[in-house]
Image (spheres, rainbow, N blue to C red):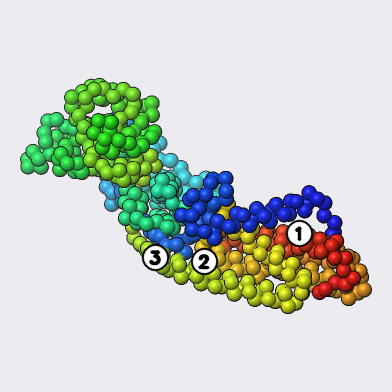
């Protein structure tokens, strides 16, 4: 048990030295490390929201807007279905409050045929044990005959729950892509309740920019400008041409435009968007590129409308209305609108990340200041140092020279733990600091078991080598059992927990692995080398 092959000695030393090197960057400021070559370890532990400050935002999805958009789709699907069956109808009014679309048929004899066809628009939900257990089972629509020659298509509660869940999951991914573009580290973005999303971004300085970037729906549409009238004339006469609508503008040329209601191309066909500069004016712009289908439609519309303006509409506001100088057939173009560099960059982020299914509204906002984080770090340092001092003193008093070996292993253990957190770019929170302090206290448990076993074997009259060998070999099973059960508990915390709980689980899990390595393998190597060099006649314990 005390014999170490040369390759094992080298491996233990390499692991220990590597951990120390990975932990060293945390002793320096970020400005100092920026000048360090890339091949030298320079990663530091990321601090969480409670340590370095940042933004805590709770968003709620606009359920009314989600229902309204869904009803528009249902009305469009119903219109197409009736036309395919050649069924005449006189209107398709929708009610957001009742979550329904009403179909008014022209002929009573078409009722059965229309009911059969419209019921095909309803999609079954559930059908397995998981969805049944959560109560999400049924159909998306309730298609029923109404008074007279009417049919009502009503959104069901299971359908609405499924729609909201899908929209929330989609929104989380969209928000994550937008925040990642800001260059922040380890943001927390998770669902809360039925229709809420929690966003926590540590280290963010410009909170207003974060809110504007996350809160924007990002729905992009390219629409033709109605040339038969202007917005001023339509507002004065209170008459908007059929198939057109008045849209407010954010550019400097007009306060509003009259545009066609139907979009010639939407942001769903957008493949990429990047900020750039106009080669002639050197003004910030955003270049975009469509997919194959969007490129064909965009090229066909621009070819038929050369010399006329078209509007670029973002979230129901015209951001630019350029004139089509020539057909745009390559599927690429640019958006200009007196942007600043930051605005151009944010707009490109919005377009690349995709549109949100519905608007997100802030219902809770908290900003954690850096001063609170500094106080927390200082308190955590004091707790860690006090715990370390008491543990070191106890081990030295109790075990003498072997206590020195245990304390050296404890120092390496802390270095390995900090180095691993730095290498994996884990986020350290207050519970994470608690996990480190707990690791310091637990790190010497294995040594206590080993040293007490060695002490018992020496009292039984065994030789130095036999006592040490028996102490390490017999304590190994107990050490593994104790640490494996704790490690399983940490994995459960990581799996079921979120945010700070996961931070605690990560530090505890890594601390268990490093503690077993240093307390058993590293101290055994130290003791083996001491025995080989000094050849003691008795165990100094």
The residue at which mark 3 appears reads as: 369
Q: Earlier in the sequence, mark 1 or mark 2?
A: 2
Pointers 3 and 2 in contact (CB under 8 A)? no
Q: Nearer the viewer, residue 210 or 25?
A: 25
Choose the circle earlier in sequence order: 3 or 1: 3
Q: Which mark is residue 430?
A: 2
- Residue 521: assigned label: 1
Quarter-wise, where is residue 504 in the image?
Answer: bottom right
Image coords of residue 366 (percent x, y):
37, 63
Residue at 43%, 68% (x, y): give it: 372
Q: Is residue 497 left or right of residue 271?
A: right
The quarter of the picture where residue 83 lies is top left
Q: In the shown orientation, is residue 64 left or right of residue 197?
A: left
Q: CA distance from mark 1 to mark 2?
A: 30 Å
Residue ID at (59%, 72%): 385
User: Looking at the image, is 54 positioned above or below residue 336?
Assistant: below
Q: Mark 1 against mark 2, which lies toward the viewer?
A: 1
Q: Badge 1 local density, few (<14 within 10 Å), some, or many (20+)? A: some
| Residue sitting at the far left | 237
């Amino acid at each position: 048990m005390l014999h170490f092959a040369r390759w094992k000695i080298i491996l233990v030393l390499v692991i220990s030295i590597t951990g120390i090197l990975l932990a060293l960057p945390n002793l320096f400021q970020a400005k100092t490390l920026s000048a360090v070559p890339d091949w030298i370890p320079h990663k530091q532990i990321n601090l969480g929201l409670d340590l370095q400050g940042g933004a805590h935002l709770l968003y709620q999805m606009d359920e009314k807007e989600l229902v309204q958009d869904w009803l528009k789709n249902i009305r469009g699907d119903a219109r197409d279905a009736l036309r395919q069956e050649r069924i005449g109808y006189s209107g398709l009014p929708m009610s957001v409050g009742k979550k329904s679309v009403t179909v008014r048929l022209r002929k009573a004899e078409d009722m059965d045929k229309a009911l059969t066809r419209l019921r095909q628009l309803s999609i079954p939900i559930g059908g397995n044990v998981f969805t049944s257990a959560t109560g999400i089972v049924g159909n998306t629509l309730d298609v029923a005959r109404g008074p007279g020659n009417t049919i009502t298509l009503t959104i069901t509660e299971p359908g609405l729950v499924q729609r909201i869940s899908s929209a929330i999951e989609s929104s989380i991914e969209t928000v994550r892509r937008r925040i990642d573009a800001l260059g922040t580290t380890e943001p927390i973005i998770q669902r809360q309740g039925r229709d809420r999303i929690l966003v926590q971004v540590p280290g963010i300085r410009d909170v207003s920019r974060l809110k504007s970037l996350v809160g924007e729906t990002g729905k992009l549409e390219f629409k033709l400008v109605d040339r038969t009238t202007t917005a001023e004339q339509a507002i004065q006469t209170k008459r908007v041409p059929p198939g057109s609508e008045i849209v407010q503008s954010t550019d400097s040329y007009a306060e509003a435009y009259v545009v066609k209601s139907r979009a010639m191309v939407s942001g769903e066909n957008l493949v990429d968007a990047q900020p750039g500069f106009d080669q002639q004016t050197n003004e910030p712009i955003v270049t975009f590129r469509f997919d194959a289908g969007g490129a064909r439609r965009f090229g066909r519309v621009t070819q038929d409308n050369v010399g006329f303006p078209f509007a670029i509409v973002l979230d129901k506001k015209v951001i630019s209305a350029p004139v089509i100088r020539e057909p745009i057939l390559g599927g690429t173009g640019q958006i200009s609108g007196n942007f600043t560099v930051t605005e151009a960059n944010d707009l490109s982020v919005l377009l690349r990340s995709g549109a949100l299914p519905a608007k997100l509204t802030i219902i809770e906002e908290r900003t954690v200041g850096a001063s609170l984080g500094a106080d927390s770090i200082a308190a955590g340092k004091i707790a860690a140092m006090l715990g370390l001092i008491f543990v070191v003193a106890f081990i030295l008093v109790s075990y003498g020279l072997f206590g020195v070996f245990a304390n050296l292993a404890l120092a390496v253990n802390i270095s390995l733990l900090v180095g691993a957190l730095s290498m994996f770019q884990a986020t350290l929170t207050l519970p994470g600091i608690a996990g480190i302090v707990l690791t310091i206290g637990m790190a010497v448990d294995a040594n206590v078991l080993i040293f007490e076993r060695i002490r018992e074997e020496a009292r039984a009259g065994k030789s130095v080598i036999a006592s040490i060998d028996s102490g390490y070999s017999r304590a190994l099973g107990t050490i593994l059992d104790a640490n494996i059960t704790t490690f399983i508990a940490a994995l459960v915390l990581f799996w079921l927990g979120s945010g700070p709980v996961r931070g605690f689980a990560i530090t505890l899990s890594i601390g268990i692995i490093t503690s077993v390595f240093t307390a058993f393998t590293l101290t055994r190597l130290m003791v083996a080398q001491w025995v080989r060099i000094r050849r003691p006649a008795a165990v100094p314990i």
